[in-house]
Image (spheres, rainbow, N blue to C red):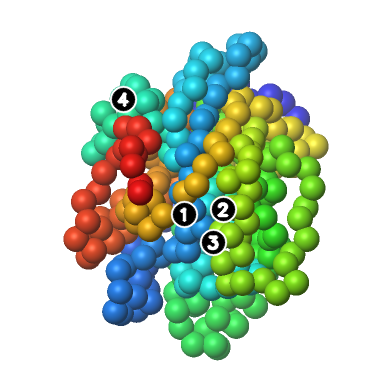
């Protein structure tokens, strides 16, 4: 097992056959699903439609990092204002007790330097998109597109897809869980990213050690209710960590459905996320959060997303954001600081 120190880690990427067409098919399929799911109301996201809360946080790059960790955003100690959006992954608005993947999307503000995304090169934001499972459900765009097509079809198409894609079924079943408290979940990027000239995955690891019991009679929105309760009383801390690729066979770039094992390469803390003590549950703040867009391509070049799923995200996230905002007659925007007043 050799350490990867190539200066061209992006050469580890390899495009799928017909990848561009697959992505366009996926965009069309997701737009169709959004339209079907929202016939008489605002167009919601195709995934992570149910937002538990948009909360204020501080993202602080740790001091005295070793040289190999002082890269890009993490080059020097600094604290950034951030928005953190917690969500359920399902496209439907379902009770929180249901098994699901949960999301933690982070938007840093005041991050200077030219970004990768062409239409937002001068935006002073940097996004991280994390979920409650360390592995992505599918291997690549083709498999993901086929899964979305099957899910939108009849029961026989669904059954055939999952019977012929056992690993997708296994990954999905291991990821879909009930969770009792959003602030006690470890979140993961699932997909890899550049970290200078190396590849990493990200994780946000909570400081809260305990697992709260589930409510005896959970309301449909008990995760939001507990988030409101906890942040009214305390600030909550997560470590933001990176996990380096050290074995290109065991830790592939193009297959995020493979677990990068922590026994091979442990996560290392590079920053601290402090979710502030606050009250956030106003209708105005909720609407503000619904109109924000997150994409891993809001990033500095040193942290460029890697792999086919991330390449698809660049196109899909932009297309769905434009579609959703135009349908809802809302302007797309990137914030430059915490919004002043949500009363």
Q: Which residue appears at 25% of the width and 49% of the height?
A: 332
* For discs 2 and 3, the disc positioned in front in the rendered view: 2
Above or below, comparing residue 64 to residue 107 in the picture: above
- Within 10 Å of the Cα at label 1, are there few (<14), some (14-19), or many (20+) other Cα atoms? some
Residue under pointer 2: 228
User: Mark 4 vs mark 2: which is more N-terminal?
Assistant: 4
Residue under pointer 3: 88
Are the residues flagged by discs 2 and 1 in contact, CB closer than 8 Å? yes
Q: Which residue appears at 64% of the width and 35% of the height?
A: 237
Residue under pointer 1: 281
Above or below, comparing residue 252 to residue 67 in the picture: below
User: Mark 2 vs mark 3: which is more N-terminal?
Assistant: 3
Element at badge 4?
A: loop
* For discs 4 and 1, the disc positioned in front in the rendered view: 1
Element at badge 1?
A: loop
User: Mark 2 vs mark 1: which is more N-terminal?
Assistant: 2
Element at badge 3?
A: strand
Residue 114 disc label: 4
- Within 10 Å of the Cα at label 4, are there few (<14), some (14-19), or many (20+) other Cα atoms? some
Are the residues flagged by discs 4 and 2 in contact, CB closer than 8 Å? no
Are the residues flagged by discs 3 and 1 in contact, CB closer than 8 Å? no
């Amino acid at each position: 097992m050799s350490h990867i120190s190539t200066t061209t880690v992006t050469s580890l990427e390899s495009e799928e056959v017909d990848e561009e067409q697959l992505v366009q098919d996926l965009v069309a399929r997701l737009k169709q699903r959004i339209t079907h799911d929202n016939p008489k109301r605002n167009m919601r996201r195709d995934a992570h439609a149910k937002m538990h809360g948009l909360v204020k946080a501080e993202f602080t790059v740790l001091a005295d990092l070793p040289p190999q960790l002082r890269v890009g955003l993490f080059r020097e100690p600094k604290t950034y204002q951030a928005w953190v959006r917690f969500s359920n992954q399902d496209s439907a608005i379902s009770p929180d007790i249901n098994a699901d993947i949960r999301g933690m999307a982070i938007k840093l503000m005041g991050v200077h330097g030219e970004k990768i995304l062409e239409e937002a090169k001068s935006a002073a934001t940097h996004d991280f998109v994390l979920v409650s499972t360390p592995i992505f459900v599918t291997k690549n765009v083709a498999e993901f597109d086929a899964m979305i097509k099957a899910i939108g079809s009849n029961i026989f198409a669904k059954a055939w897809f999952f019977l012929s894609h056992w690993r997708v079924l296994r990954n999905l079943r291991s990821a879909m869980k009930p969770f009792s408290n959003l602030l006690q979940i470890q979140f993961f990027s699932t997909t890899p990213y550049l970290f200078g000239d190396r590849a990493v995955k990200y994780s946000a690891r909570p400081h809260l050690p305990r697992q709260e019991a589930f409510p005896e009679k959970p309301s449909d929105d008990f995760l939001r209710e507990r988030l409101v309760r906890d942040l009214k009383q305390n600030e909550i801390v997560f470590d933001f960590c990176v996990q380096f690729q050290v074995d290109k066979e065991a830790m592939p770039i193009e297959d995020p459905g493979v677990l990068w094992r922590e026994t091979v390469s442990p996560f290392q803390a590079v920053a601290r996320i402090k979710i502030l003590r606050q009250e956030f549950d106003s209708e105005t703040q909720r609407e503000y959060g619904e109109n924000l867009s997150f994409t891993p391509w809001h990033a500095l070049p040193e942290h460029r997303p890697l792999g086919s799923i991330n390449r698809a995200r660049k196109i899909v996230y932009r297309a769905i954001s434009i579609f959703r905002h135009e349908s809802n007659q809302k302007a797309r925007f990137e914030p430059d600081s915490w919004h002043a007043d949500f009363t």
